[in-house]
Amino acid sequence: MINIACPVIGEKEGRLIKEVLDSGILASGKYVSQFEQSFARYSDAKFGIASVNGTASLHVALLMCGIKPGDKVITTPFSFIATSNSILFCGAKPIFVDIDPKTFNINSIEIERVLKKEKNVRAVLIVHLYGLSCDMEAIIALKKKYKFMLIEDSCQAHGAEFGNKRVGSFGDTAAFSFYATKNMMTGEGGVILTNNEEADKYGRQLINHGRYSHSLHTILGYNYRLTNIAAAIGIAQLEQLESWIEKRIINAKKYNEAFKNLDFVKIPYVPKNCRHVFHQYTIRVSSIERSKFIKYLADNGVNSGVYYDTVLYKQPLYRRRGYGSVICVEAEKAVGEVLSLPVHQSLSENDVDKIIEVVNGYKK
């Protein structure tokens, strides 16, 4: 079976992990600091704060923007539930708006429609889904016009670009995940980015029990620290990220060429000014065909995945919170049609050729 994801762990990761074990300093230390600085520099941001996972990173990113109980935060309903849950962690209220059907990302026109009618919208939390940047030109224009805080959920978009600028450097804060299936990983882990020095200082307190000095705790904080072991893996992975992204892009281009004339598949759309890093290669298949197609793929040795099959406001947690009347037409259509195929850097040429052969053989 060709798997939908396959983490790469090489010699460099093993060597750095051994260095950490030999040092005896397994909790946060110099490897964490090195990883924070390297990832911030890679992402065109001034400051990076390593954390225990992507969800914690989202929580802290929102807190660094001053999100508090009662605030309203616009976001997308088409994402992993950590996106909107992080808003709830702050006691704030998610306001879901629809997506662009071509990119699957939050629709800037829908953002403005809500901003015009909703009072006291404190922030917008966008998601660069599947490895593709949101329309940052339009969103930054809205930020200037309406003066909201902007948080980038970049958990699937390491190295993605809009207009030659990397995601994670546009907003007031940004969150990344290094879960095992991401384009680069630390097993579990995350990073919060910002260009604001005061926000960086506050975020460092938030992840470390609100600690101001060794024995002085001045704010309510959390135990969200990353370990040296995880950071060591991240250091090695980051060195290889660009080559892995290029492999994903090459694989995606082969699929696009092979599938462009299939009448039952709609290939991913990539705006000309964006660098899509293909955390997922996500096609659209009619909702009538999708289950049958997934079974066909599996029967022929190709694993696939549906990310995501339910809009967030229809999750039981959100229904109980009164979100039953929300309707985002494009997001609801997308959850019935999206399907991701293996695109990761561990695929061999034979793997890619087999996937192409299997997909092309479906109607035959």
Image (cartoon, helix red, strand yellow):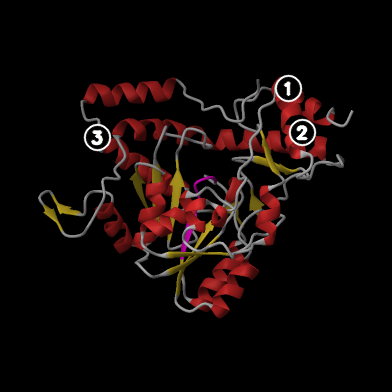
Is 106 positioned to the left or the right of 11 in the image? right
> Along the polypeptide, which appears first: circle 1 or circle 2?
2
Q: Answer yes or no: is residue 254 visible.
A: no
Q: Which mark is residue 292?
A: 2
- Of the residues shown, which amino acid type is indicated by label 2? Lys
Residue 61: x %, y % from top left: 39, 57
Upstream in sequence: badge 2 or badge 3:
3
The amino acid marked with disc number 3 is Ala
Residue at x-position 57% and y-position 33%: 244
Residue 151 included in the magenta stretch of the image: yes
The secondary element bearing badge 2 is classed as: helix
* Mark with earlier residue (3, 1): 3
Image height check: is 343 above or below 300?
Answer: below
Name the amino acid type tagged 1: Asp
Residue closer to the observer: 108 or 77: 77
Residue 338 magenta: no
Q: Badge 3 is on which residue? A: 27
Mark 3 element type: loop
User: Marks 2 and 1: in contact by CB < 8 Å?
Assistant: no
Q: Nearer the viewer, residue 267 or 257?
A: 267
Element on which disc 1 rests: helix
Q: Residue 2: which quarter of the image?
A: top right
Name the disc covering residue 299, or none. 1
Rendered location of residue 251, percent (x, y)? 69, 33
The residue lying at 48 percent from left, 79 percent from top is 119
Q: In the rendered image of this protein, does residue 212 appear above or below residue 284? A: below
Q: What range of the chain is rendered magenta?
A: 150-156
Q: Position of residue 67 (x, y in %)?
A: 37, 65
- CA–CA distance between discs 2 and 3? 48 Å
Q: Which label sits in the foreground, 3 or 1?
A: 1
Q: Residues within 10 Å of mark 3 (few under 14, many from 20)?
A: some
Spatial CA distance of label 3 from label 1 is: 45 Å
